[in-house]
Image (spheres, helix red, strand yellow):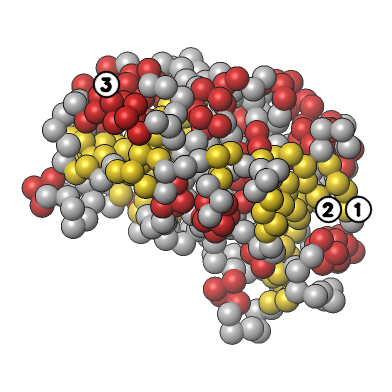
Amino acid sequence: MPQLAGRVITPKDADYDEARTVFAAVDRRPALIARPASAEDVAAVIAHAREHDLPLAVRSGGHSPAGHGVVDDGMVIDLSGMRRMELDPERRVAWAEPGLTAGAYTAAAGTAGLATPFGDAGSVGIGGIATAGGVGFLVRKHGLTIDDVLAAEVVTADGRRLRTDARTHPDLFWAIRGGGGNVGVVTRLKLRLHPVGPILGGMLLLPATPEVLEGFVAEAEAAPDELSAIANVMPAPPLPFVPVEHHGRPVVLALLAYAGDAGAGEHVVGRLRALATPIADLVRPMAYPALFEGGEPEAGQAAASRTLFTDRFDGAAAAAVVDAVERSTAPRAVAQLRVLGGAMARVPAAATAFAHRDRRMMATIVAMYERPEERADHEAWASALTEQLRHDDDGAYAGFLGDEGPDGVRAAYPGEHWDRLADVKAAYDRENVFRLNQNVPPAGGSARLAA
């Protein structure tokens, strides 16, 4: 057992079951769960795992849809205890450790009227989202999370603690921005901050008809980059502000963020409101960090999920989404549509390991369920709707991929991105020590294949 400044949790500890729980519905029992306090601790855990030939899982916030943050009979590096943050408002940068959550980071930065783009869930660990991509509430205004990673400290498979940026180990710097945990454990991040004052944001609930949904996507696409919009097509939840007659009926639950002039924002949001009489309208001026409060997923929920990028969304696609949500037998079925473009698309595709800069929209299809015997039905539902939306498109977002095998990973890292990531992997992790992820094996073969 490694000696750490942090803590090691074993199956004998009272909080072992809580410590091994992640957001995916997996029941895995690691031999050890290490909560390092420093990069030195991380290196010690990696060395122990290699010495004893133990599989090694790494997690920041535990949101991997495939449950990659926990492993049977192996070791877990749980970075949740590493949460230090140094904010430099004058230079508009922050150094932050990977266990800090997006919500906590955004709240701290918000005290200075600044923000780094993350996703849309406050409990996500920044170590995961800042290496996978980060498609969130500021994606059109300020781009992906990885676009604001300026430097990082990384522990590699051989225990080296490296500082990487555009000039120092540039191949490693390229790979950590979109390549996830394939090439090392990020222990510290230098992140750019943007001025983000009060925004016009919140939830807009509209009836889900094909016309409303198609119109929503078109308006969100035509809007200025200041607007980022996430449309969740789902049965209306029984929330206090939702009239009872709409409970369980398909709605477009839209999460909006307009980071710009308030008057212009009211005009843009007004066009969305005009698509249909809103069922509920909670869009209001607010502090940006308020978007990350509440609405968190529950840990351990079983879900059939798919992720894809698409460049075409017409009336037929809108009808397919609404019809599929109506027909789903899952306790909760969601088709989530994120309109892209803007700042994200202005970064060259070759600049980072994230390949899908020019895609029009990202879709995520999810059916949550409780009984294991229902899995096949919900997987079939998710696959069918995905194929209806895919057309001739290809591509997937690594941060939302489930356990979809090599084909799914290839979709996340197509063509030259795969080849380059495999080359960097070979340079920093020839033995594929970091393989419990959306794995790109090292070029030239590996002694350990992806699990």
Q: Are marks 3 and 2 in contact (CB under 8 Å)?
A: no
Q: Residues within 10 Å of mark 2 (few under 14, many from 20)?
A: many
Q: Quadrant of residue 132?
A: top right
Q: Are marks 2 and 1 in contact (CB under 8 Å)?
A: yes
Say left or right for 226 vs 270: right
Q: Which corner quadrant of the image does residue 31 belong to?
A: bottom right
The image position of residue 425, as x and y in percent, is: 82, 38
Q: Residue at x 59, y 68 (%)?
A: 20
For marks 3 and 1, the one nearer the N-term is 1
Q: Which residue is mark 1?
A: 160
Percent across and percent down for residue 197 are 47, 42
Query: Closest to the observer: 246 or 11?
Result: 246
Tell me the element at label 3: helix
Q: Secondary structure at mark 2?
A: strand
Q: Secondary structure at mark 1?
A: loop
Q: Position of residue 204 (x, y in %)?
A: 26, 39
Q: Residues within 10 Å of mark 1 (few under 14, many from 20)?
A: some
Q: The N terminus lies in which quarter of the figure? A: bottom right
Q: Badge 3 is on which residue?
A: 215
Residue type (three-letter) at the residue carrying disc 3: Gly
Residue 110's disc number: none
Q: Residue 395: name its quadrant.
A: top right
Residue type at the position of mark 2: Val
Q: Amino acid at mark 1?
A: Arg
Please indicate, yes or no, whether residue 248 appears anywhere in the rendered image: yes
Between residue 300 and residue 345, name the one nearer to us: 345
Give the residue number, with chain letter if any, for mark 2.
155
Give the side of residue 205 with respect to residue 160, left or right: left
Residue 213 in sight from this viewpoint: no
375 and 45: which is toward the camera: 45
